[in-house]
Image (cartoon, rainbow, N blue to C red):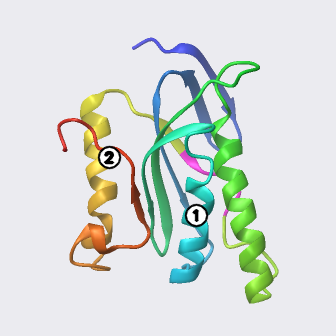
Amino acid sequence: MAFKNFSIWRGRLPHWRASDVTYFVTFRYRRPLDATERNLLLRQLIKPDGLRWDLLIVCVLPEKTDLIFRVKESPRSGPYELSEIVEKAKTKSGKAIIKKTGERFSPFYNESFDRILRDEAELEERWQELFEAPVNLELVDDPEDYDGLWVADAPSSVE
């Protein structure tokens, strides 16, 4: 499969970037987040939706967050860097949590795992996993009852 404007950069993990693709991103925390902290993180993640990316689904769980989205093109040059969007939300949320709890460090690790979803089948599979995660973890009986789940769009075969 050939990607448009494909590039790779490396932090501790390799990160693939391309134009016109759908990404799956996940990141874990140093400690579990309570409901208020999860809500704060969720609000920060959905804040840039429509400006820099098109979020399809976000699931903020007690021990990790998963997202599926498409990055938009910057008016200046190429697509926005997805790590800047995700890391900015983590930084803002982390500072607010530190202020509230008095902790020394943010509960978020610096790097996230990201993956380009290769096809519609993988998108559907990952989307369904995120949607069902609160039920599978026995946090709620119905995914729509979970406050840490935000859904903008489902793949056509899931609807």
Query: Dot 2 lies on which element?
Result: helix
Label 1 CA crowd tier, 10 Å (few <14, some 14–19, many 20+):
some
Residue 32: quadrant of the picture: bottom right
Give the magenta range. Answer: 109-113
Whichever of callouts 1 and 2 sits on the residue coming sooner in the sequence is 1
In this view, the mark in front (1 or 2): 1
Q: Position of residue 136 (x, y in %)?
A: 25, 70
Q: Position of residue 93 (x, y in %)?
A: 69, 67
Residue shown at 32%/46% (left/top)? 126
129, 45: nearer the viewer = 45
The residue lying furthest to the front in this view is 50
Specify the amino acid type for callout 2.
Answer: Arg
* Above-or-below relation of 73 to 128: above
28, 10: nearer the viewer = 28
* Above-or-below relation of 70 to 83: above
Residue 65 relative to residue 31: left or right: left
Residue 65 relative to residue 96: left or right: left
Q: Which mark is residue 134?
A: none
Label 2 CA crowd tier, 10 Å (few <14, some 14–19, many 20+):
some
Specify the amino acid type for callout 1.
Answer: Arg
Count of all numbered marks drawn on residues in the image: 2
Residue that mark 2 sits on? 126
Residue 62 relative to residue 111: left or right: left
Residue 59: quadrant of the picture: bottom left
Q: Which mark is residue 43?
A: 1
Does the residue at mark 1 contact the one at mark 2 (Cβ under 8 Å)?
A: no
In this view of the protein, can residue 65 be seen by the observer?
A: yes
Residue shown at 31%/47% (left/top)? 127
* Above-or-below relation of 148 to 150: below
Judged by its main secondary structure, the magenta piece is loop
